[in-house]
Structures are given as C-alpha cells and as structure tokens.
Image (cartoon, grey):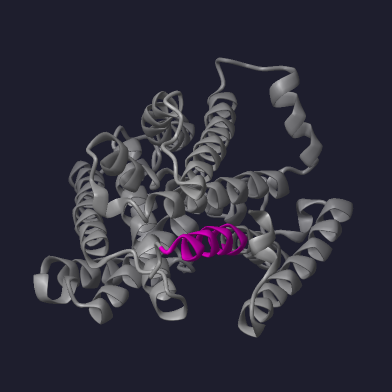
C-alpha cells in the first residue's frame, strides 16, 4: 500500500518538496540548539516552558479529537462517518508524532527522555502522560492498519480489533485529561490551578480537531475525487458548535471566578493576558484576536444557514482553529509563569530558531498526513469508493 505515496502529479511533489525544505531548515536549527543549548530560545529561569510545550499541548487535543468520528461510527453504527474514520485516525497518528517531537526538541538533552522508561516514577504525571500518549499512538497505528487492510481486501475486520477500538475511545479522552493534570496539579501556578482545566482541554480538543478535519475534507473534495459526504461534514460542524460553546463557557467561568474573587494571584494572570501589566502586553493583541474569532465562529455555527453553507463553514472552521491555537498555542502556557509566584514579570517571546524548528515539526506532521492520505485515497479510488 505504501507505494501509493510515491506516486503523484507535479502539484503533489511540489507540496512534498516544500515540506521537505522546511524540515531540512528546521533540522539545521535544531542541531544549532543541540550544540548551543536552549539559550537560543526565549526560555529563561522563570519561563521554563514556552512555544514548544504550547504546541505539544495544542496537538494533544488534535490527536484526541479523532474520538469524535471513531465513537459514532464504531459504537453507534453511524454510517455517515464511514469514510471519515480512517482519515481521523491518520490525523491522530500525525498529531501524536508531532507531540513527541515537540517534547524531544524541548529537552535540553533530548536523549534523557529514555530515563522516563529506564527509571519510571508512577507518582509523576509526566510519566503517565508519556505512557498514555505513546499508548494512543500504538492503538491508532494498529486500528488503522487492521481496519484499512480489511477494507482494501473487501472483508470484515477481525473480531479482536473491536475491543481495541473500544479501548481507544476512553484512551483518547485520557491523553488530554492527563495533559491537563500536568498543569492543574502545580499548586504554585494559580492560573493553571483550576478543576475546569481538563474539561476545557477536552472542549478545545473536540472543537479544534473536527474543525481541522472539516477543512481537510472540503480541501480533498476540491483537489481529488474524494467526497466525505454532506451529512458527515454537517454533523462534524454540529460537534464543533457544541464543543466550542463549552470552551467559551468554561473560559468565562474562569474569568468570572478570578474577577469576582479579586484574588491577585488569580486575577493578575488574566490581566496580563487581556490588558497587560506594567507595559508588558505582548500577548494582549493575540488573546483579543482569539476572543473575537471565538465569537465570530459561534455566530456562524449557530446560524443553520451559514453552518450548512460550505463557504461560511470554511470561515467558521478557520476561526475556531485559530482561536484555540492562539489561546493554547500562545497564551495558556506562558501565562502560567507570568507573573511569577514572587510577582515579577519575565517577558517571553519565541525566537526565530524556535519558530523554524516548530515549523519543521509541523511540516513533518503534514508530510505524514500527506503520505497516509495519499495511500488511503488511492486505495479507495481503486475500489471505487471515491466515485
């Protein structure tokens, strides 16, 4: 099957070449980081997690979102998601790989990651996060390979794979729940010390991931003969609408709690995010953009006419994805360290090497998705499913 990824027209290979160039540039900057250390990043003694960990956090949600197509199809026999399921699982595989790569580049000495397995610490949330993420990757690889091979042969999947699929559903929820526990379990960081962190992480996951899948499905409809079906896309749009509504609701709950209590250690983080403190306002325009995009997306999604119109749905999905990325991929991690427990402010912004290394990881993930989707669409076209 993999040989299908090595066939394509000029557009296909041009896209692959662009991704390959970004990967090579990022690898060059990573070698510089490896030789020089994390001093080439914007990280410091006060802000020890930055752009890398923020991208890891965001992508864990994208990976977990595959459950939004797996659960209806396999547990509720919702046939409209039949063509989407394998593509959702492939997207989850790429997202988990990117998660691992962001952890790898964030380590000062990346090969120390082996110590997590050589010297396991069950009382550490980092240990459990590693276990659930690696386990989720294995589950998705096994499920997608077995089910897609059966589809290619025109036979039913073996019976033993059904329990594995059922296991993958709570496992998908667990990967983002445990990631949320990494933050909410840190008592010295009031911004993260909230019981609503895990539910909000899941809400962002179940809106950003399906929004991305909608965009991919609409793109594939234009550049290939694959069509996921209007009903499937409409149901995904409904999922995005409800999940994004919960995300906004949870955020407003946190803001109300911080503002009404008036406790400086809670309120100062939100002031830093949305208004800035003592002239430090780097994140303010991004967070207000995120808020505006969230409202804009909900207006489009709650209106059935715009939600069911492909053009408006594209804008709504882009708004959802960017809003959550700005929130989790820029604001959430850095603000946990700002202000510090001593009340001081240490400015942080990603450096050019950080951005190029991150772009390389995203390019690698896009390359994995490109190859996997090329295989899936080629096989389905041969079987006549895409016509």
Any part of residue 33 in sight: yes
Question: In the image shown, does 144 or 287 lie closer to the viewer?
Answer: 144
Q: Is residue 299 above or below residue 32?
A: below
Q: Is residue 129 above or below residue 13?
A: above
Question: In the image shown, does 293 or 282 lie closer to the viewer?
Answer: 293
Quadrant in the picture for residue 209: bottom left
Q: Is residue 24 above or below residue 135?
A: below
Percent coordinates x, y for residue 384 in the rendering: 42, 64
Question: In the image shown, does 77 or 157 lie closer to the viewer?
Answer: 157
Left or right: 36 in relation to 50: right
Left or right: 61 in relation to 198: right
Residue lying at 27% horizontally and 34% vertically, measured from the top left = 75
Residue lying at 80% horizontally and 40% vertically, measured from the top left = 109
Q: Quadrant of the N terminus?
A: bottom right
Residue span colored magenta: 370-384
Residue lying at 78% horizontally and 33% vertically, measured from the top left = 112
The answer to whether residue 256 is magenta is no
Percent coordinates x, y for residue 233 in the rendering: 27, 63
Q: Main secondary structure of the magenta part?
A: helix
Residue lying at 46% horizontally and 35% vertically, measured from the top left = 175
């Amino acid at each position: 099957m993999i040989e299908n990824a090595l066939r394509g027209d000029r557009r296909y290979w041009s896209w692959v070449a662009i991704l390959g160039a970004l990967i090579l540039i990022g690898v060059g900057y990573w070698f510089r980081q490896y030789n020089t250390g994390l001093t080439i990043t914007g990280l410091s003694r006060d802000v020890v997690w930055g752009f890398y960990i923020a991208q890891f956090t965001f992508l864990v949600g994208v990976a977990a979102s595959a459950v939004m197509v797996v659960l209806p199809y396999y547990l509720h026999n919702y046939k409209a998601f039949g063509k989407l399921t394998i593509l959702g699982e492939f997207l989850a595989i790429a997202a988990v790989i990117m998660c691992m790569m962001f952890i790898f580049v964030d380590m000062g000495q990346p090969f120390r990651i082996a110590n997590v397995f050589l010297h396991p610490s069950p009382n550490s949330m980092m240990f459990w996060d590693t276990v659930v993420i690696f386990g989720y990757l294995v589950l998705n690889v096994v499920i997608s390979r077995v089910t897609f091979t059966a589809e290619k042969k025109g036979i039913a999947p073996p019976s033993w794979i059904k329990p594995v699929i059922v296991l993958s559903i709570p496992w998908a929820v667990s990967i983002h729940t445990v990631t949320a526990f990494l933050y909410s379990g840190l008592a010295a960081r009031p911004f993260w010390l909230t019981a609503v962190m895990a539910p909000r992480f899941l809400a962002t996951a179940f809106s950003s991931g399906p929004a991305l899948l909608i965009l991919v499905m609409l793109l594939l409809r234009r550049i290939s003969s694959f069509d996921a079906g209007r009903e499937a896309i409409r149901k995904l749009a409904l999922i995005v609408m409800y999940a994004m509504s919960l995300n906004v609701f949870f955020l407003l709950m946190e803001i109300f709690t911080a503002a009404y209590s008036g406790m400086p250690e809670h309120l100062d983080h939100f002031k830093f995010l949305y208004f800035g403190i003592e002239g430090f306002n780097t994140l303010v325009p991004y967070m207000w953009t995120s808020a505006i995009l969230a409202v804009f997306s909900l207006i489009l999604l709650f209106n059935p006419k715009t939600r069911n119109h492909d053009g408006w749905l594209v804008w709504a999905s882009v708004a959802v994805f960017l809003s959550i990325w700005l929130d989790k991929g820029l604001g959430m991690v850095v603000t946990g360290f700002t202000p510090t427990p001593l009340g001081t402010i240490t400015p942080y912004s990603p450096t050019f090497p950080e951005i190029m290394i991150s772009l390389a990881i995203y390019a690698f993930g896009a390359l994995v998705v490109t190859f996997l989707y090329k295989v899936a669409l080629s096989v389905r076209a041969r079987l006549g499913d895409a016509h």
